[in-house]
Amino acid sequence: MPESSKSVVVVNASPLIALGTCGRIDLLRSLYDRVVIPEEVQTELAVGGETALPAGLMEANLKWIEVLRLNSPLSIAMTARLDDGEASVIALALELGATRIVMDERKGRKLAENLGLDVIGCVFRGIVSNIFGDRVSKDFDTVSKVFVFSVSRFQLFPALPRF
């Protein structure tokens, strides 16, 4: 298990949706002692539609995923560049003194890195590689579901068709 397993991580909606799609939100619990999301992300997850979990976060997940409210309003500069979910993840990480966030969106990742946060995504240099490492072939089904979801949803490779 990586060194980060004893730290707090603030998570954005897209990684939760990708992991939820294949029923593996629990991977976060195995990597981190404290998993936090801002209220804005919980709202985004519960809205429904293509970009949300069908029923939001399950009650079982909410026993170990903390939903926190920001102490300060989001800055205009941040909300001008990002949606409320990404902006609130970065702001909450800074408020908590957390050093790591989980986010897939490019603009948010770049801003977070410029603010000194360590950013990991769901597939690339992220959760799946931290969990599975050399054992990717042993749990290929989970890895492939997260990868296919990430590619199709965020069009990491525009030449591929959306699924």
Image (cartoon, rainbow, N blue to C red):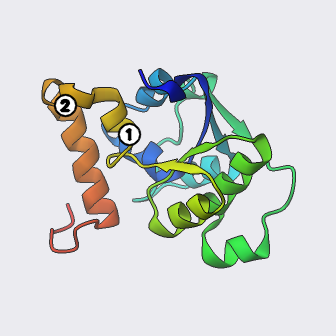
**Is residue 37 visible from the viewing direction of this image?**
yes
Name the mark on residue 136. 2
Element marked by disc 2 = helix
- Residue 89 vs 9, above or below: the answer is below
Element marked by disc 1 = helix
Question: How many numbered tags mark residues here?
Answer: 2
Cα gap from disc 1 to disc 2, whole angstroms: 15 Å
Residue 97 % position (x, y): 75, 41
Residue behind mark 1 = 19
- Of the residues shown, which amino acid type is indicated by label 2? Val
Residue 160 % position (x, y): 15, 68
The N terminus lies in quadrant:
top left
Mark 2: few/some/many CA within 10 Å (<14, 14-19, 20+): some
The residue located at (32%, 49%) in the rendering is: 124
The residue located at (21%, 66%) in the rendering is: 162
- Residue 99 vs 86, above or below: the answer is above
Relative placement, left or right, of 92 versus 17 is right
- Residue 35 vs 85, above or below: the answer is above
Q: Nearer the viewer, residue 12 or 48?
A: 12
Whichever of callouts 1 and 2 sits on the residue coming sooner in the sequence is: 1
Q: Nearer the viewer, residue 20 or 118?
A: 118
Q: Nearer the viewer, residue 46 or 26?
A: 26
Residue 143 % position (x, y): 23, 37
